Amino acid sequence: MRQIRKVVNAAAAKRGHTITLSVRLLPKPSESRNLGMEADVWAKEGIVDVIVTCNHWASIDFDIPLAEWRTWTGHKVPIVPGADSGIAENGKRRFATFEEYRRWARIMHERGAKGLYLFNLFQHPQDGPVWNGVLSGGLAPL
C-alpha cells in the first residue's frame, strides 16, 4: 500500500490535482485483519484516504460495525459502508430489492455513515425499481 500511495502521489503531482486512494475491505475489521489488511496502519499513516467496507458477492451485510471501524482506524479516514447487489437465501443468491437496499441504507445512516457505496448495481435493469429508486435519492437519510 505504501508503494501504491507513492504512485498515486506522483500521478497527482503530474496532473496537478489530488487523487484519492481508497480500499475496499470486508465488512468487519476482524475479517480484514485476519487476511492481513492493515487498515488501521494505512489510515493512521495517511496511506489511504477512504475505506469502503463491503460484502463480497453473497449477501448484503446489514451489520457493518461502523463504530468499530472508526475506532480501529483512529477516526483518521472516512469509513464508507458498501453493499453488493445480492441477498443470499436458502443457499441461493438473488438480486436485492430496492426495499432491501433502503433498509440497509437506513441502518448504515443510523450508524453514522456519511456516504454509501453500491457495488455491482449495474446488474439491475436500468429502468427498474432499484435503479429508479436509487437515482431519485431513495437512499438518502430519512
Image (cartoon, helix red, strand yellow):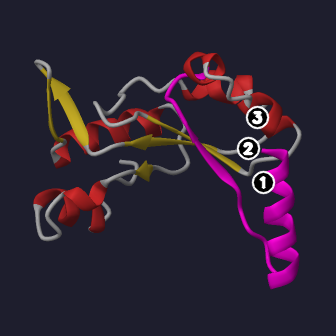
Residue annotated with mark 3: 75
Residue at point 71% right, 62% down? 20
Q: Is residue 59 magenta?
A: no
Q: Nearer the viewer, mark 1 or mark 2?
A: 1
122 above or below 15? above
6 above or below 52? below
Q: Earlier in the sequence, mark 1 or mark 2?
A: 1
Q: Tell whether label 2 touches label 1 (CB within 8 Å).
A: no
Could you say where residue 64 lies in the image, as x and y percent from the top left? 47, 27
Q: Give the residues in magenta.
A: 1-29
Residue annotated with mark 2: 77
Residue at point 79% right, 64% down? 8
Q: Is residue 5 magenta?
A: yes
Number of residues whose C-alpha sits closer than 10 Å to that of mark 3, classed few (under 14), some (14–19) or many (20 or more): some
Measure how far apart labels 3 and 1 are at the Cα level: 22 Å
Residue at point 82% right, 63% down? 7
Q: Is residue 25 among the parts visible in the rendering?
A: yes
Could you say where residue 46 lies in the image, as x and y percent from the top left? 85, 46
Q: Amino acid at mark 3?
A: His
Mark 2 secondary-structure assignment: loop
Q: Where is residue 51, by image quadrant?
A: top right
Q: Tell whether label 2 touches label 3 (CB within 8 Å).
A: no
Mark 1 secondary-structure assignment: helix
Residue annotated with mark 1: 4
Q: Is residue 16 among the parts visible in the rendering?
A: no
Could you say where residue 86 lies in the image, as x and y percent from the top left? 23, 39
Q: Amino acid at mark 2?
A: Val
- In the picture, which quadrant includes the N terminus? top right
